[in-house]
Image (cartoon, grey):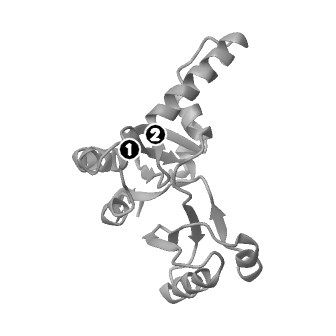
């Protein structure tokens, strides 16, 4: 089991009315037993949440963990904030375009708009697939030397195969020259909870 709620809570801030972070309970095909893998797509969303306060996250957390255990799923959260005002305005535009295009089924509209919108916080995830914390420390130290100046690593989140570094923006070109095999994810969520059923 991996439980990152205390790491995550430190990253969340709700300065404007309508600020939220998307949280998903995902069932991943690669986590399922061999015989069940053909039954669904590579990632299936069991449930999604708009986290608009720390209190809401804490109130729903037991439910999230139970869903993860029951479905052999993982909980992921975006650490890039969005706002309901922007989502609503963009949903109106997208809805009008869909209707004009002859598409009258709108059940996925919210998720589609949320997935395409620019976010307020420019946070990246540096995905390090090693369990050696010394190697993680070396990567963290290297990132701190890159432009722009100032601290860039905001948190180190444990994952099943290593760590996610939650960072501010930095010089990707120089980083990739030094660490060509490390993936930088600019729009992906990070791990919130991995249940015992997936250990």
Query: How many C-alpha atoms fall within 10 Å of the one at disc 1: few (<14), some, or many (≥20)?
Result: few
SS under mark 1: loop
Q: Residue at x 36, y 39 (%)?
A: 17
Q: Are marks 2 and 1 in contact (CB under 8 Å)?
A: yes
Mark 1 or mark 2, which is nearer the start of the sequence? 1
Residue 41 disc label: none
Which residue is labeled 2 in the image? 83
Task: Reply above or below: 10 against 177.
Answer: above
Is residue 113 visible from the viewing direction of this image? yes
In which quadrant of the rendered image does the N terminus lie? bottom left
108 lies left or right of 1: right
Going 66% across and 11% down the picture, which residue do you hit? 99
**Label 2 packing within 10 angstroms: few (<14), some (14-19), many (20+):** some
Q: Is 103 situated above or below 136?
A: above
Q: Residue 38 falls in which quadrant of the image?
A: top right
Image location (x, y in percent) of residue 70: 34, 45
Image quadrant in which you'd find residue 47: top left
The residue pinned by badge 1 equals 16
Residue under the point 50% across and 27% down: 88
Q: Secondary structure at mark 2?
A: strand
What percent of the width, then of the height, locates residue 182? 67, 73
- Give x and y (percent) for residue 52: 34, 43
Residue 194: image location, x then y, percent: 39, 59
Find residue 156 and report its image quarter: bottom left
Q: CA distance from mark 2 to mark 1?
A: 8 Å
């Amino acid at each position: 089991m991996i439980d990152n709620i205390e790491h995550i809570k430190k990253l969340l801030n709700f300065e404007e009315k309508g600020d939220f972070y998307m949280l998903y309970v995902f069932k991943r095909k690669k986590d399922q037993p061999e015989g069940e893998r053909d039954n669904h797509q590579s990632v299936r969303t069991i449930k999604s949440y708009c986290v608009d306060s720390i209190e809401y996250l804490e109130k729903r957390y037991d439910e999230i963990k139970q869903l993860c255990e029951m479905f052999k799923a993982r909980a992921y959260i975006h650490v890039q904030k969005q706002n309901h005002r922007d989502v609503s305005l963009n949903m109106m535009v997208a809805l009008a375009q869909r209707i004009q295009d002859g598409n009258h089924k709108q059940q996925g509209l919210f998720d589609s708009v949320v997935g395409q919108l620019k976010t307020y916080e420019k946070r990246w995830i540096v995905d390090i697939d090693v369990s050696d914390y010394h190697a993680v420390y070396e990567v963290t130290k290297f990132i701190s030397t890159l432009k722009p100046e100032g601290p860039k690593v905001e948190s180190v989140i444990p994952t099943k195969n290593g760590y996610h570094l939650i960072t501010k923006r930095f010089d990707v070109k120089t980083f990739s020259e030094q660490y060509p095999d490390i993936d930088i994810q600019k729009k992906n969520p990070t791990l919130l909870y991995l249940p015992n059923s997936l250990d």
